[in-house]
Image (cartoon, grey):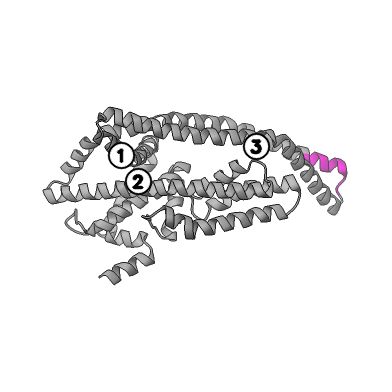
Amino acid sequence: MKTDLSPAKPSLLTFLQYFLIIVLILYFGQSLLIPVSFGLLISFVLYPICRWLEQHKFSRVMAILTSLVLFLTLTLLLVALMVRQFSLFTRQWPDLYDKVILLLNDAFKNVGDFFNVAPEERRNWLQTLLTDASQKILQILPRTVYNTSISTVLFLLVPFYTALILYYRKLLMTFLFQIFPGAKRQEAILSILQESIIAYYNFIKGMALVYLIVGILNSIGLAILGIPNAIFFGFIASILTFIPYIGITLGALLPMSIAWLTYDSIWYPLGIVGIFVVVQVLEANIIFPLAVSFKLRINALATITVIMLGAIIWGASGMILFMPFTAIFKLIADRVEVLKPISILLGTPEEIEKDHDGG
């Protein structure tokens, strides 16, 4: 059902003005908007659970607390698994560090022999390189610790925002009804929100299953190759696939480097590439279509643009948040006639052909 919530389509200039204002608000308000955005997305996931609990004699407060505790417990279990795997990886780092030093020595020796550089001067080069790297790390470390502490404080607010959004959802709905008065518009808003929440909830459930299956397959493949900490690398690569086209490359680089340093052979990194390619083919053609019945489909150009825009405005948080919000916005644009051009811009050619065939 197409619904028009505004009297006329905005001009291109008006659209650009709105876009610029939104970007400025997002950039300067990120300290507030990032945790609120995470809370909003999590509330979308937890709302169907809360509603089901409320229908089964739970009070609103108990339903919210129960669903939030379940979500946090699952999250903490996943974090604990990754921390344990990372600790196993750090135990092997001294041996890997020694191999890195040997490789650097060999590289400097080859370069020195080629340019007729004396061994003493080569050692000075290597020492200077390591000293400069250490100094830069020490310079970056305080800023990194500060930014991490700020981010930790902000993310500790996410559960509170989630609980408050779920608790005051009727108040927020009333606010939207006041902005868009009229029975037809209010009915349209309610319908759009319900469909968006249900679609996004089903999508997140499906994607969680996809990440789980892909992580297991990656881990099995890496374990067969004998790569250390196969579970850690397998699930890191699986989680990074939320960044289309780029994430799988980032996820493969670390285990490829570890395999090369561990076995000193090019065949192991090539084997990792082969495993990840096979798993990605299975994910794209079998796992994803079966696990995610409702696809929030956005074309590749829009996907990459949104991810880069999110990185520019909000950094890593933007890369995570901008895609689901764009997908939700597309769900709304599909149902609002005035936003149809944006829906076409974000959509895929298959959707446009389907609409023309349906028409």
* Image spot of residue 43 (x, y percent): 33, 38
Tag 3, which secondary structure?
Answer: helix
State the separation of the CA atoms marked 1 and 2.
Answer: 9 Å
What is the spatial separation of the Cα atoms under label 3 and label 1, in whole angstroms?
Answer: 38 Å
Q: Is residue 66 above or below residue 14?
A: above
Q: Earlier in the sequence, mark 3 or mark 2?
A: 3
Looking at the picture, tell me which residue is in the foreground, 152 or 124. 152
* Type of the residue with mark 1: Tyr
For residue 322, say whether it is visible.
Answer: no
Residue marked by disc 2: 201
Query: Could you tell me how many numbered marks the image carries?
Result: 3
Q: Are marks 3 and 2 in contact (CB under 8 Å)?
A: no
User: Left or right of 55: which side holds 225?
Assistant: right
Name the residue beneath numbered marker 3.
Answer: 89
Q: Position of residue 101 (x, y in %)?
A: 77, 40
Q: Residues within 10 Å of mark 1 (few under 14, many from 20)?
A: many
Q: Secondary structure at mark 1?
A: helix
Q: Main secondary structure of the magenta part?
A: helix
User: 334 or 122: nearer the eye?
Assistant: 334
Q: Is residue 111 left or right of residue 75?
A: right
* Residue 118 falls within the magenta-colored stretch: yes
The answer to whether the residues at label 3 and label 1 have Cβ atoms under 8 Å apart is no
- Disc 2 marks which amino acid? Tyr
Residue 296 colored in magenta in the image: no
The residue pinned by badge 1 equals 47
Do tag 1 and tag 2 residues touch (Cβ < 8 Å)?
Answer: yes
Direction left: furthest residue: 182
